[in-house]
Structures are given as C-alpha cells and as structure tokens.
Image (spheres, rainbow, N blue to C red):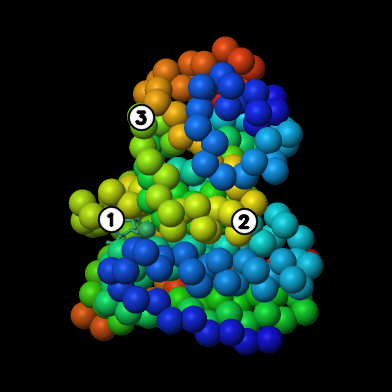
C-alpha cells in the first residue's frame, strides 16, 4: 500500500499533519502500538525538519507485509555535513523553530534511535532525502 | 493517580477530555522542548509544559501522551483543542509556574520518568 503527502516548508501550523495521517492508517491496519510509535516519532521529527529547514517536500509511505518504508524528500538548502548533523545537539535552527519546541539538535539522533534503518542523502542547494525502514516482525 | 486528582492538586482548569478524568497517570515529565518529549517511551505519562502551540499537541499525539498540563497561565488555543479532542486527550490549564506545578504533582505521588 502506497501513500504520499506534501509538506510545506515554514508552515508550522500544518507540521505533523502527514505524520498524523500515517498514524491513523497504521492504527487501522492493527500495527502494534509500540511499532507505530517508533515509526511516527521518527516520521514526525523528519516532517518537522522539512518544515523547519527546507522549502517544500513530500513523504512517501509504502506499507508491506513485513516492513514499512518511508522516504522524506525535500527541496531545500541540503545538509553540508551529514555526520555533524547527526550529532546530538547540533542545530542551525532559527529562533522561530525553537519557539515551536524544536531546534535542539535532537531530531536526527532521535530518528536514528527509532528507525530500524535510517539513511540520509543530501545535496547542498538542492535538497535532502531521509529514508526510514521499520520492520513489522 | 486519577487525572481528576491531578486537576484538584493543580487547582487546574479542565479545557477538554472530561470523559477521561478517571484515567490513571503514573509518571510526569516537564519540558518545553518537544524533541525531548519525543525521546520518551513511557505509558500513563503526564506532560507538563509552558509551550502552548499546535506542536505540543502533535507531539503528545505521536508519543501517545493522553494528558497535558499547561503551566504559567498559558492559554490553550482552539486549534489545539480540536486536535486534542480528536485524539482523546485531556488538556488542563494551571496558574502555577512549572516548578510550582511539578512540586505539587510530585508531592501527590506522580513519579519522574528518570
Ligand atoms: N531536511 C533538512 N534540510 C536541511 N537541513 C537539515 C534538514 N534536516 C536536518 N537538517 C540540518 O541538520 C541539523 C540537525 O537536525 P536535527 O537533529 O533534526 O535538529 P534540529 O532540527 O533541532 O536542528 C539541523 O539544524 C539542520 O542544520
Ligand atoms: Mg529537527
């Protein structure tokens, strides 16, 4: 089963709408709550990153019998040093993002913790793609 | 403790979730940083925060948190109530500071996550 959601950069009033929709679907599919939580926490941090750091993006979700594959793709400034971005506490977030309760440099580390597989690809000046796999068994 | 007791202890204002006042909460976590909240893996948790925006509610939704207390007289806004109701959350306003609210909850038996 495949789903796609658009994300608007900078629009914090909509941040989380896609993650919420995915959570609803996974619940309907009777995915165990602990697995849902891990996936949607990672997805939500990723969605917030697009809103906070990029211009626009989209989320693809592909649900299969044994795994959920998510890719969060954006057009944006990209990440010059991914290893650095993965460090806890590293953040370039604006004051506005901090006021939303994010921007402490915990997002990517938290995504890594919650995903069974995480891959970040980025091209400076073009955009970023984050892939997440969560196994259902 | 029951959420109704928590409401009493905080002399709080119930803004939504009246149906769930008999639900039990065991643990408390206080933060204005939603990324911190998203690192938790605890059931029956109350989030105590001064951050009154939609992201607080979305964070609670993703983290399966069913009760959120807003301290320092922060007002819960209508779009927050809309999403919280849909996800069967209890939202409470309280006039105490973060420290004051937590002290009362701790004294009443709510436990820290770590
Ligand atoms: N989609 C993205 N586009 C551009 N930069 C990003 C993106 N995601 C993360 N980053 C960069 O990586 C840093 C760390 O991200 P993260 O760990 O989520 O922390 P935070 O978002 O709180 O800053 C960000 O501050 C930003 O510099
Ligand atoms: Mg982030």
Query: Which quarter of the picture shows residue A33?
Result: bottom right
**Image-based side of A79 in relation to B60, left or right:** left
- Residue at the image point whose x is 36% and y is 37% from the top: B74
Above or below residue A70? Residue B94 is: above
| Residue A124 location (% of width, % of height) | 24, 77
* Chain of the residue on which disc 1 is drawn: A
- Name the spot of residue B32 as percent of width and height, x first: 38, 39
* Badge number at residue B72: 3
Q: Is residue A67 visible?
A: yes
Of the numbered discs in the image, which one, if any, rests on residue A38? none
Q: Are marks 1 and 2 in contact (CB under 8 Å)?
A: no
Q: Is residue A109 visible?
A: no
Give the CA distance from mark 1 to mark 3: 21 Å
Q: Quadrant of the C terminus of chain A?
A: bottom right
Quadrant for residue A2, please give it. bottom right
Rendered location of residue B60, percent (x, y): 54, 49
A16, above or below A113, in the image = below
For the residue with label 3, is its CB less than 8 Å from the closest atom of ligand 1? no
Q: Quadrant of residue B51?
A: top left
The local secondary structure at tag 1 comes to helix
Residue at the extreme top of the image, as rendered = B107
Looking at the image, is mark 1 or mark 2 nearer the viewer? Answer: 2
The residue singled out by tag 2 in the image is B87
- Residue A97: assigned label: 1
Identify the element where label 3 is drawn. Answer: loop
């Amino acid at each position: 089963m495949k789903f796609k959601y658009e994300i608007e950069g900078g629009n914090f009033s909509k941040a989380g709408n896609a993650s919420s929709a995915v959570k609803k679907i996974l619940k309907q599919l009777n995915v165990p709550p602990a697995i849902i939580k891990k996936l949607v926490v990672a997805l939500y941090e990723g969605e917030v990153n697009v809103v906070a750091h990029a211009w626009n993006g989209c989320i693809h979700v592909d649900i299969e019998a044994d795994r959920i594959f998510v890719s969060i793709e954006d057009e944006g400034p990209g990440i010059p040093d991914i290893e650095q971005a993965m460090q806890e506490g590293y953040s370039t977030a604006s004051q506005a993002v901090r006021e939303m309760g994010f921007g402490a440099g915990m997002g990517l580390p938290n995504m890594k913790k919650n995903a069974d597989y995480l891959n970040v690809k980025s091209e400076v000046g073009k955009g970023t793609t984050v892939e997440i796999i969560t196994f259902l068994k | 403790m029951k959420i109704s007791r928590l409401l009493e202890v905080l002399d709080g204002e119930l803004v939504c979730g009246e149906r769930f006042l008999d639900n039990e909460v065991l643990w408390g976590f206080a933060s204005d940083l939603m990324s911190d909240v998203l690192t938790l893996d605890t059931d029956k948790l109350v989030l105590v925060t001064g951050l009154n925006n939609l992201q607080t509610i979305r964070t609670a939704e993703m983290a399966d948190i069913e009760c959120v207390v807003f301290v320092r007289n922060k007002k819960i806004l209508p779009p927050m109530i809309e999403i919280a109701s849909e996800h069967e959350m209890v939202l409470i306003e309280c006039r105490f500071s973060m420290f004051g609210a937590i002290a009362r909850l701790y004294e009443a038996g709510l436990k820290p996550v770590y």
